[in-house]
Image (spheres, rainbow, N blue to C red):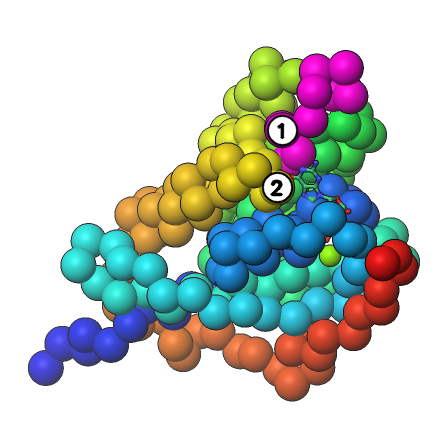
Amino acid sequence: MANRGPIHLKLVVLGDQYVGKTSVIERYVYGKFDSCYTVTLAGHFSTKFVNFEDRDVKLLIFDTAGQEDARTVIRSLYRDAHGILLVFDCARRDTLDHVTEWMELLKQNCFAMPEVVLAGNKCDLPNTFKAVNRLQGEELAGLHQIPFFEISAKHDLNVKEAFQSLVHRVLSIRGLTQSTRDVITIRKTDASNKSSSTCC
Ligand SMILES: Nc1nc2c(ncn2[C@@H]2O[C@H](COP(=O)(O)OP(=O)(O)OP(=O)(O)O)[C@@H](O)[C@H]2O)c(=O)[nH]1
Ligand SMILES: [Mg+2]
């Protein structure tokens, strides 16, 4: 008999420190936004159920630390991911420049190259604060042949669409229609949520 249990997908949100990774996950999974900054020191995951072509899909969405010195720690979180939401900050040009480095890290460290969607977060900010425009995001995404979304965790703009695009790509391009429960290994240490508040 065919296995009709939920499809399990491991998605990981990556990007430089302070680009809004935690905020994007909190918006998508819990529908909330907090303007206080709480640094993520390692990583942890949230779960969300979605539907894709009449199949239940359970998303395990891993948050990761953006700090440079956490690169080795977070490698174990993304190397077996099915999909990556790669986030930069529209107000910081360097975070866009680092996208190519993130793509290199994925190529070097992943067991199989995951699907990647690029997201320019904080698009709610006024133009005077922006260091990256839509065209620049689109151009870089085009170079890497990945989709691009301007998103805002704060104003709830395109966050759902970016995740939907990622899930769609993983499931339709890769054809992962069987349960992927077996290919996901969640180590206890991966799920540790070590964070400390730096404001408020
Ligand atoms: N204006 C605006 N601010 C945002 C948005 N998303 C996040 N922020 C703010 O940006 C700051 C950093 O957000 P976080 O989600 O903590 O960033 P992070 O990428 O998880 O940071 P690390 O865990 O240190 O890597 C916080 O003060 C957020 O409130 C957004 O869409 N718009
Ligand atoms: Mg964080």
Tell me if the residue at label 2 has its CB under 8 Å from ligand 1: yes
Instruction: Count up the numbered dots.
Output: 2
Q: Real-space Cα distance between discs 1 and 2?
A: 7 Å
Q: Position of residue 152 (x, y in %)?
A: 59, 37
Could you tell me the amino acid type at mark 1?
A: Asp
Q: Give the farthest residue toward the front.
A: 200
Magenta highlight range: 121-130
* Residue 156 appears left or right of 89: left
Q: In which quadrant of the rendered image does the N terminus lie?
A: bottom left
Q: Badge 1: how crowded within 10 Å, few (<14), some, or many (20+)? A: some
The residue tagged 1 is 124
Identify the image quadrant of residue 99. Answer: top right
Marks 1 and 2 in Cβ contact (< 8 Å): yes
* Residue 76 appears left or right of 179: right
Secondary structure that dominates the magenta span: loop
Q: Position of residue 185 (x, y in %)?
A: 53, 78
Tell me if the residue at label 1 has its CB under 8 Å from ligand 1: yes
Identify the residue at image location x=80%, y=69%.
195
Identify the residue at image location x=59%, y=18%.
134
Residue 149: in magenta span: no
Could you tell me the amino acid type at mark 2?
A: Lys
Residue 14, compared with residue 141, is above or below; it is below
Q: Which mark is residue 154?
A: 2
Identify the image quadrant of residue 194. Answer: bottom right
